[in-house]
Image (tube, rainbow, N blue to C red):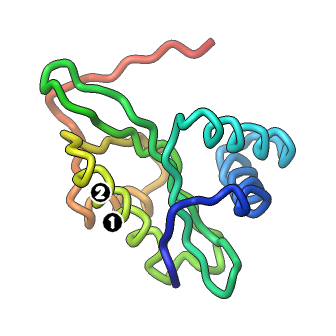
Amino acid sequence: MKIRPFDISDLGQVAVLLDEYRMFYKKDSDVKACKHFIEARYNHNESIIFVAEENDIVFGFVQLYPVFSTVSLQRAYILNDLFVQSNHRSSGAGKKLIEKSFEYAKENNARYVCLETGVDNVKAQGLYEKMGMSVDNEVLYYSSVF
């Protein structure tokens, strides 16, 4: 297994993975929209994507969005998407994708990496905790959905 930066030649495979990821969250399948979404993030340098690959098959990805922390005066990253196809979920790919994300964030002098996950996604929560992440008990996050 190889963890490496996304390349535009990965677009078709990553679009399919993003579609599977979205269906996990009860969204309708739309590979074409996923392809356009990833392509736009790539073309505008709006996210950092790493892929998990074996034998030229991309089976997992992680997507980071850069933000800034005014309080710490540093960059930070939102780990917005992490997905590994079900037949590779015991391979350690999720762990390696997170490790690569942390490595990238540290190399770019980020203060932190944060993420959100469903309260029912217990398996993912276990992985995040194994990776040294913890639930933030000092800050409340609010959102408005439009």
Query: Looking at the image, is 138 positioned above or below residue 110?
Result: above
Nearest to the observer: residue 39 or residue 81: 39
Residue 109, given in percent of the width and then of the height, sits at: 20, 44
What's under tag 1, amino acid-wise? Glu
Q: Is residue 46 left or right of residue 8?
A: left
Residue 124, given in percent of the width and then of the height, sits at: 43, 59
Query: Looking at the image, is 5 positioned above or below residue 38?
Result: below
Which residue position holds label 2?
A: 102
Q: Residue at x 51, y 56 (%)?
A: 62
Q: Residue at x 33, y 58 (%)?
A: 128
Q: Is residue 145 left or right of residue 12?
A: left
Residue 2, given in percent of the width and then of the height, sits at: 51, 80
- Element type where label 1 sits in the image: helix
What's under tag 2, amino acid-wise? Phe
Residue 68, given in percent of the width and then of the height, sits at: 29, 26
Labels 1 & 2 near each other (Cβ < 8 A):
yes
Q: Hey, which quadrant is residue 77 in on the image?
A: top left
- Element type where label 2 sits in the image: helix
Which residue position holds label 1?
A: 99
Nearest to the observer: residue 58 or residue 9: 9
Query: Looking at the image, is 100 positioned above or below residue 34?
Result: below
Q: Residue at x 69, y 46 (%)?
A: 22
Badge 2: residue crowd in 10 Å (few <14, some 14–19, many ≥20): some
